[in-house]
Image: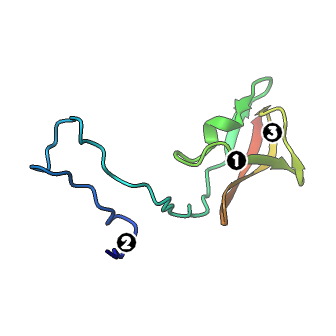
Amino acid sequence: MCRSLSAGTEPNGETPNNGIVPDANANLTVDFGFFVCPNNWAPVTVSVCAGTTVNLTTLEPVGYTGGTWYNNGNVVTNLTHCNGTFSYVFTNGTCMASGTVPGTTNT
């Protein structure tokens, strides 16, 4: 038997009765690994007061966390900063999205 599958059309019914309550036959879906590539994102400028910092991980797009932060082309290892321009790159297989966060210190 052959099936043509695409994202959002995976078989997910169960027999008998296509029950919605979990039972011994529940969760018969197959994960084929379909993944929607994220779009690039453009967050707003982050302004912090002098002497305070922002945790860059709080600026990561929902669903695309765990990427890499850069400052002037260098990987940022301390993700708490007060100012500077930071780039975020999220990669999953051949999918990639990036965005830049300009940070300024209010005086």
Q: Quadrant of the N terminus?
A: bottom left
Q: For mark 2, give the secondary structure.
A: loop
Task: Give the labeled residue for mark 3.
Answer: 83
Q: In the image as oriented, which residue stretches furthest toward the left?
A: 17
Going from the N terminus, do you reach mark 1 or mark 3 first? 1
Residue at 62% x, 41% y: name it.
59
Left or right of residue 85, residue 39 in this image: left
Residue at 60% x, 58% y: name it.
41
**How busy is the neighbourhood of tag 1: few (under 14 within 10 Å), some, or many (20 plus)?**
some
Residue 5 is tagged as: 2
Residue at 82% x, 49% y: name it.
70
| Amino acid at the residue labelled 1 | Gly
Up-down: is 94 above or below 89? below
| Amino acid at the residue labelled 2 | Leu
| Amino acid at the residue labelled 3 | Asn
Q: Pointer 2 and pointer 1: residues touching (CB < 8 Å)?
A: no
Task: Give the labeled residue for mark 1.
Answer: 67
Going from the N terminus, do you reach mark 2 or mark 3 first? 2
Q: For mark 3, give the secondary structure.
A: loop
Mark 2 and mark 3: span between their CA atoms? 47 Å
Mark 1 and mark 3: span between their CA atoms? 20 Å
Callout in the foreground (2, 3): 2
Q: Position of residue 61 (x, y in %)?
A: 57, 47
